[in-house]
Amino acid sequence: MLVFAKPLYFILMVIPLAMIVWYLFRQRRAEATIQFSTTQGIDKIKPSLKVRLRHLPFVLQVLAIMALIAALARPQTSNSWENVTTEGIDIMMSMDISSSMLAADLKPNRLEAAKDVAAAFINGRQNDNIGLVVFSGESFTQVPLTTDHAVLLNMFQSIQSGMIEDGTAIGLGLANSVSRLKESKAKSKVIILLTDGSNNRGEIAPVTAAEIAKSFGIRVYTIGVGTIGTAPYPVQTPFGVQYQNMAVDIDENVLKQIASMTGGQYFRATDNKSLKGIYDEIDKLEKTKMKTSQYSKKYEQFKYFALAAFIFLLIQVVLRYTVYRKIP
């Protein structure tokens, strides 16, 4: 990119502009006129190349002055680069995919709402390793820690309720996430655990899994999803799937205990807006640290403009004293 260190010199561009105005004025006054009764016979005579290019010496003179002014303005190019040092955060997202996540108190249901909001969260964490663990009656790793967020998002959208045995094994989901983070060398290790129920399956109790997370310095943010009171759940009937209002059962005490033990926080999402707000809050709490050092080196380019001015003047002088030489 070309920049000028002393752009005030461009004020001198009024000089070539004044020269052009004066030249046009002088040309108009210097034109001689001869009256003819008719132009028949001479109107077909075409002017020679020399006549057509008679203004070229003046044009070259103006270009030379403009190039000199540009050279005085000190044109420069710069070479800039930066060194970026990041202290990334490793994040495992542990998501409940049990059948109760199909409840429609969040739109279109809890699972789809959670997937959409989590995807937006992932898109804003470009420097972090993020993985995904899903659980219901069992738990497995859908995506290990990765910076390839395109693959992560693709796999994220493919998860659905019914992939594994039904139930709510919060302890297994948390323990599985811990196993993926325990060897991490990141400065900050985080688990975001989202569920809409109470632990009723699995060999590992949620509090036991929280103690393991604490021993590895892993912070756990827990999110309880579901409205207060009752929510419409899909139920299979002889007439197809119908929605019936059922009580929302979230073990908030356990989720709060997990968050407190590990230095995280507990959140309750009762609708789509509050769920998005929770992820926004977590995003603010867990910011990637970044150090940036910028360097820049400038190169003077005036010599090219000065050379152009010299060439224009040289051609102008040659033409003026040869082809367009005036004899008094």
Image (tube, rainbow, N blue to C red):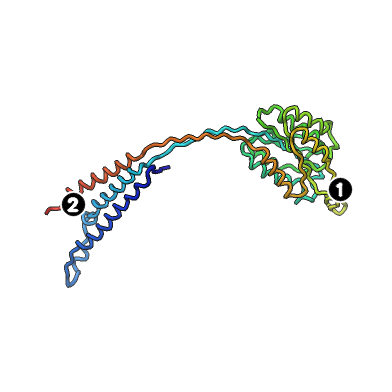
Measured as percent of width and height from the top left, residue 193 is found at 75, 38
Reply above or below: 215 against 51. Answer: above
Q: Look at the image and tell me in which quarter the C terminus lies.
A: bottom left
- Which residue is at 78% across, 48% downward? 270
Q: Residues within 10 Å of mark 2 (few under 14, many from 20)?
A: some
- Provide the residue designation for mark 2: 324
- Provide the residue designation for mark 1: 247
Measured as percent of width and height from the top left, residue 132 is found at 71, 37
Measured as percent of width and height from the top left, residue 87 is found at 62, 32
Callout 2: SS: loop
Residue furthest to the right in view is 238
Give the label on residue 116, or none: none
- Which residue is at 18% across, 52% downward? 324
- Confirm or deny contact between disc 1 and disc 2 (CB under 8 A): no
Reply above or below: 88 against 35. Answer: above
Instruction: Identify residue type, mark 1.
Output: Ala
Of 101 and 14, nearer the camera is 14
Callout 1: SS: strand
Residue furthest to the left in view is 328
Residue furthest to the bottom in view is 37
Reply above or below: 273 against 291. Answer: below
- Which residue is at 74% across, 31% downward? 178
Of 36 and 71, nearer the camera is 71
Q: What whole-number distance in Å separates the C-alpha atoms at marks 1 and 2?
A: 101 Å
Instruction: Identify residue type, mark 2.
Output: Tyr
**Which quarter of the picture shows residue 139?**
top right
Of 108 and 178, nearer the camera is 178
**Which quarter of the picture shows residue 70?**
top left
Measured as percent of width and height from the top left, residue 56 is found at 25, 52
* Sooner in the amino-acid sequence: mark 1 or mark 2: 1
Q: Residues within 10 Å of mark 1 (few under 14, many from 20)?
A: some
